[in-house]
């Protein structure tokens, strides 16, 4: 049930019936203050202006045409022409029951499921994932989970960096290592592997010559080079998949759509862009000049799509990828989770694809960009020696810190119990700290904050969840078979129920704008409202059995909402901690 949508539709109908234009918008918002009701229609003034009539008069007229008595118990016209709506408790109670009894909380699912491609994570081969990949990976994954929940057909595109001239030196080095160690190389430390191969390339001319030779051979499809290249990808992706698993991220090997899959299509795209007159020769390279972007000299900016030596670029691959995603994968919408520094790159890619008619304007292209992760000093997050932080090292530290913390709070846990709680809390804390910040800005990574059991953190929400469950344990009751119906008599019950029913509106924001912090803030509100309900409304010692059952049901709906919400964020819940 999407209350906002329901009210929007109804008020709009009444507005049109009252003479407003058919494209008017009721502008329904959740009210900021209780005195203004639960929801507010703010669209009357704009409609009245168009009609050149008094907004209060229009509001009066709209109210006369409204048929919402089933769910709204009081309607007030306020100020210049706001309509304040007070929801009916019985209806709210009934909706709460419906949500509790429905697997998907009775959410309104997508009426037209879309093919949505989510381009995220995208680490590079023969390099360790570092903190820079964390944001793309976990924000993208939250988006995937939410869109799938709503019934969309989501295609996860892990645009792995698996192609480029660096593969010559990587293959040469892999070969060298294989020759030196009789058995297969593990490449357990990709960072060292990459650094060493670069070092050989820079310092050893024979090695460098071989490496350059391998680049040409690889591009020509040489079998040996391809096999070695495959091996590098396999080793890297095996490690990355293990990291995804650790992170509770849904990406698997099948979701890998690396840059290399577009290789065979690149010459055709470049030739076509030339034939269409969109790309031109310039100093031996092939370039698209864009009037929409100016360079430092104020001239149209050139985007190189093929270098003088014949090599293709990152932009060429992305132009081809968007074309492919539309033509072959039938995308309706593509979301890119890439850091904000690549915004211009994407805009140019899309513009070129549009100019070439590879994609229609109806295709929704969205860059869900994000800022950087900063250290407490406000500078990019680095190790003490100034290196980028490897993602796995970061997670190791999280586990270590959470182990100390949980052990000190609860020294009697068994080994397995401890491990399960630590995993949920440590990984949850790191993810939540990121997901709960507005992704569009940089944020400061702070261990103490994220592992705190107070405030808007994963441990707080995970703990709140266990507290709700503990009510059922204490009463030796199952949340799955409660009797009777929810009734909302106390203010705190009502406030909690409304918030729980607003889950749908919250989830839609994440689905539309890819802003998981809105869901985090919402879950935090739920936990806070539940605390206050629990403080004021006795549950197990309620005056009557009916009241007890009703309150238990509200508790069950709270637990269910927290669990589903945290799951959408890719954060684990535990039963006890
Ligand atoms: N591999 C790139 C990097 O590490 C990110 C790729 C993002 N996706 C894309 N379609 N360009 O920066």
Image: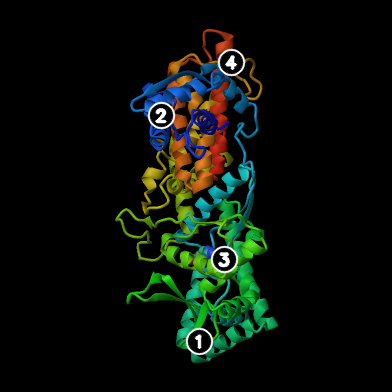
Task: Residue under label 4, please give it.
Answer: 549
Asked if 287 appears above or below 128 in the picture, the reply is below
Give the alpha-carbon distance from disc 4 to disc 2, as whole Å: 30 Å
Q: Are marks 3 and 4 in contact (CB under 8 Å)?
A: no
- The answer to which of 234 and 114 lies nearer the viewer is 114
Crowd around label 2: few <14 · some 14–19 · many ≥20 (10 Å): some
Crowd around label 3: few <14 · some 14–19 · many ≥20 (10 Å): many
- The answer to which of 381 and 279 lies nearer the viewer is 279
Name the front one of labels 4 and 2: 2
Q: Residue furthest right?
A: 223
- State which tag comes first along the sequence, 3 or 1: 3
Q: Residue furthest front?
A: 52
- Determine if the C-beta at disc 1 is less than 8 A from ligand 1: no
- State which tag comes first along the sequence, 4 or 2: 2
Residue 247 is situated, as x and y percent measured from the top left of the image, at 54, 51
Give the alpha-carbon distance from disc 3 to disc 1, as whole Å: 25 Å
Name the front one of labels 3 and 2: 2
Residue 41 is situated, as x and y percent measured from the top left of the image, at 44, 30
Give the alpha-carbon distance from disc 3 to disc 2, as whole Å: 44 Å
Instruction: Identify the residue at horizontal 65%, vertical 60% (top origin).
Output: 253
Give the alpha-carbon distance from disc 1 to disc 2, as whole Å: 60 Å
Instruction: Identify the residue at horizontal 43%, vertical 40% (top origin).
Output: 457
Task: Residue under label 3, please give it.
Answer: 160
- State which tag comes first along the sequence, 1 or 2: 2
- State which tag comes first along the sequence, 3 or 2: 2
Task: Residue under label 1, please give it.
Answer: 308
- State which tag comes first along the sequence, 1 or 4: 1
Q: Image check: 409 left or right of 576?
A: left
Q: Which mark is residue 31?
A: 2
């Amino acid at each position: 049930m999407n209350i906002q949508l329901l009210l929007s539709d109804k008020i709009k109908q009444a507005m049109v019936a009252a003479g407003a234009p058919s494209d008017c918008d009721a502008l329904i918002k959740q009210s900021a203050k209780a005195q203004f009701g639960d929801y507010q229609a703010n669209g009357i003034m704009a409609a009245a202006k168009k009609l050149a009539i008094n907004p209060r008069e229009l509001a009066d007229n709209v109210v006369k045409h409204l048929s919402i008595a089933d769910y709204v118990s009081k309607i007030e016209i306020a100020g210049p022409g706001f309509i304040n709506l007070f929801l009916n408790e019985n209806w709210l109670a009934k909706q709460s029951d419906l949500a509790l009894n429905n697997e998907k909380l009775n959410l309104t699912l997508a009426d037209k499921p879309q093919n949505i491609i989510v381009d995220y994570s995208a680490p590079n081969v023969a390099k360790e994932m570092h903190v820079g990949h964390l944001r793309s990976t976990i924000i993208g994954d939250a988006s995937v989970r939410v869109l799938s929940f709503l019934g969309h057909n989501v295609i996860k595109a892990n645009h792995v960096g698996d192609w480029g001239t660096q593969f010559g030196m990587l293959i040469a080095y892999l070969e060298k290592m294989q020759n030196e160690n009789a058995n297969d190389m593990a490449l357990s430390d990709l960072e060292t592997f990459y650094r060493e191969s670069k070092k050989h390339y820079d310092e050893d001319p024979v090695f460098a010559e071989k490496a350059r030779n391998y680049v040409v051979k690889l591009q020509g499809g040489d079998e040996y080079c391809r096999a070695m290249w495959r091996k590098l990808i396999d080793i890297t992706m095996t490690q990355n998949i293990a990291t995804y698993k650790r992170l509770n991220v849904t990406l698997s090997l099948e979701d890998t759509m690396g840059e290399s899959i577009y290789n065979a299509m690149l010459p055709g795209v470049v030739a076509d862009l030339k034939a269409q007159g969109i790309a031109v020769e310039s100093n031996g390279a092939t370039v698209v000049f864009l009037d929409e972007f100016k360079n430092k000299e104020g001239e149209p900016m050139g985007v190189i799509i093929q270098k003088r030596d014949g090599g293709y670029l990152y932009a060429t691959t992305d132009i081809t990828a968007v074309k492919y995603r539309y033509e072959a994968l039938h995308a309706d919408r593509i979301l890119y989770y890439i850091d904000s520094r690549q915004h211009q790159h994407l805009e140019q890619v899309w513009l070129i694809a549009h100019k070439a008619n590879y994609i229609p304007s109806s295709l929704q292209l969205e860059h869900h960009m994000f800022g950087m992760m900063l250290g407490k000093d406000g500078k990019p997050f680095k190790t003490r020696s100034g290196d980028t932080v490897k993602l796995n090292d970061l997670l190791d530290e999280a586990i270590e810190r959470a182990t100390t913390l949980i052990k000190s709070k609860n020294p009697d846990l068994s080994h397995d119990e401890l491990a399960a709680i630590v995993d949920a809390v440590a990984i949850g804390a790191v993810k939540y700290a990121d997901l709960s910040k507005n992704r569009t800005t940089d944020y400061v990574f702070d261990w103490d904050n994220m592992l705190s059991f107070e405030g808007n953190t994963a441990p707080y929400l995970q703990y709140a969840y266990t507290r709700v469950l503990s009510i059922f344990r204490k009463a030796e009751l199952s949340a799955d078979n409660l009797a009777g119906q929810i009734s909302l008599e106390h203010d705190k019950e009502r406030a909690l129920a409304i918030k729980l029913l607003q889950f749908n509106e919250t989830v839609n924001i994440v689905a539309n704008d890819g802003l998981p912090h809105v869901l985090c803030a919402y879950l935090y509100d739920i936990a806070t409202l539940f605390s206050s309900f629990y403080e004021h409304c006795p549950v197990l010692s309620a005056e009557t059995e009916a009241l007890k059952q009703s309150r238990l049901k509200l508790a069950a709906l709270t637990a269910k909402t927290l669990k589903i919400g945290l799951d959408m964020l890719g954060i684990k819940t535990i039963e006890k901690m």
